[in-house]
Amino acid sequence: MKDLESPNAGEIDALAVLWESPEPLGLSSVWEGVVERRTKRGAAAPAPTTVSTYLRSLKAKGLITQVSAAAPVGTASSGGGALRTRGATRKGPLYRCVYDPISVLRPTLAALAAAFPEEHRALALEEFARLLELRE
């Protein structure tokens, strides 16, 4: 596999929303998911234009793909068609992840691991497990 460019913190929020969805999502759905994630953490909500920037950057990095709203779910396209859903027409692109979370985040995790002095690595692992809400 090629070396993937690491996402920044905001882009990781957008990726997390896309990873959680079985279907491609449009900008407004990704933005709503990012706002929900940030609200749970007590962080400030980004503007929709900021999330749009995250999606453009992730696409440029090759971490997500843009799917035409008119294309069947299995078809990638950069066109801008419309999707009929329950009597309504939806315009604008949909996005989906190209890679799984481990493939994308492995370089970031490796850099974090390397940053911890050996005597603090067990504590770092415990803290990471706590943040993942893993039980002992």
Image (cartoon, grey):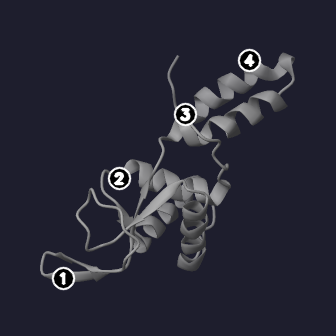
Q: Looking at the image, is mark 4 or mark 1 nearer the viewer?
A: 1
Graded by Cα atoms within 10 Å as few (under 14), some (14 to 19) or many (20 or more), the crowding at tag 4 reads few
Q: Which residue is mark 3?
A: 132
Residue sitting at 34 percent across and 60 percent down? 24
Q: Name the N-terminal-most of marks 1 and 3.
A: 1
Compare residues 40 and 122 and report the one nearer the observer: 122
**Given contact means CB atoms under 8 Å apart, are the residues at marks 1 and 3 in contact?**
no
Whether 117 is drawn above or below 27: the answer is above
Q: Amino acid at mark 3?
A: Leu
Mark drawn on residue 122: 4
Residue sitting at 51 percent across and 41 percent down? 101
Q: Disc 4 versus disc 1: distance between alpha carbons?
A: 53 Å
Q: Disc 4 versus disc 3: distance between alpha carbons?
A: 15 Å
Q: Disc 1 versus disc 2: distance between alpha carbons?
A: 21 Å
Whether 18 is drawn above or below 107: the answer is below
Q: Residue 90: where, in percent of width, then height? A: 27, 80
Graded by Cα atoms within 10 Å as few (under 14), some (14 to 19) or many (20 or more), the crowding at tag 3 reads few
**Given contact means CB atoms under 8 Å apart, are the residues at marks 1 and 2 in contact?**
no
Q: Amino acid at mark 2?
A: Ser
The secondary structure type at the circle numbered 3 is loop
Q: Disc 1 versus disc 3: distance between alpha carbons?
A: 39 Å
Q: Disc 2 versus disc 4: distance between alpha carbons?
A: 33 Å
| Quarter of the figure that contains the N terminus | top right
**Given contact means CB atoms under 8 Å apart, are the residues at marks 4 and 1 in contact?**
no
Q: Name the N-terminal-most of marks 2 and 3.
A: 2
